[in-house]
Image (cartoon, helix red, strand yellow):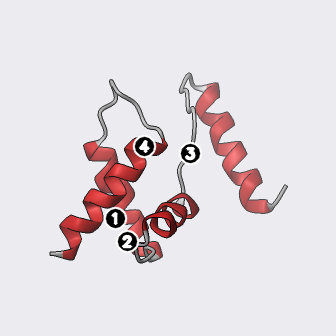
């Protein structure tokens, strides 16, 4: 396990300890994969952070987050920011 993976695992364990449930984590490599699949330019690190902030405000917690909702949001965000 890399140092970064260990830090992430420690953070998840801390959240669990205090009663938070974290099902999955999304990261820039996920965005890179979607952009590649959709033939889009990949996000810079800064754009990825901005996207995840946008996505956190946009996501419907009743529906949840999955690959399809992430992909739709990436496409929408890219279209909005291309204007």
* Along the viewing direction, whichever of 58 and 18 lies nearer the viewer: 58
Q: Are marks 2 and 1 in contact (CB under 8 Å)?
A: yes
Q: CA gap, disc 2 to disc 1?
A: 5 Å
Please, is residue 2 above or below residue 39 in the view?
A: above
Q: Earlier in the sequence, mark 4 or mark 2?
A: 2
Please, is residue 10 above or below residue 77 in the view?
A: above
Report x, y in % for residue 51.
Answer: 35, 61
Residue located beneath label 2 in the image: 47
Q: Earlier in the sequence, mark 4 or mark 3?
A: 3
Relative side of 60 to 24, left or right? left
Q: Earlier in the sequence, mark 4 or mark 1?
A: 1
Relative side of 25 to 51, left or right? right
Q: Are marks 1 and 3 in contact (CB under 8 Å)?
A: no
Q: CA gap, disc 1 to disc 3?
A: 16 Å
Residue located beneath label 1 in the image: 50
Q: Residue furthest left?
A: 83
Residue at left 43%, top 72%? 39
Residue located beneath label 4 in the image: 68
Task: Assess disc 3: are there few (<14), some (14-19) or many (≥20) residues with their C-alpha within 10 Å of its C-alpha.
Answer: few
Numbered disc 4: secondary structure = helix
Q: CA gap, disc 2 to disc 3?
A: 17 Å
User: How many labels sit on residues?
Assistant: 4
């Amino acid at each position: 396990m890399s140092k970064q993976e260990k830090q992430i695992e420690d953070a998840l364990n801390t959240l669990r300890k205090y009663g938070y449930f974290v099902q999955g984590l999304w990261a820039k490599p996920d965005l890179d994969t979607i952009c590649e699949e959709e033939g889009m330019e990949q996000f810079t690190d800064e754009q990825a952070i901005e996207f995840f902030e946008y996505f956190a405000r946009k996501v419907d917690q009743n529906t949840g987050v999955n690959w399809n909702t992430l992909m739709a949001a990436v496409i929408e965000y890219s279209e909005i920011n291309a204007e």
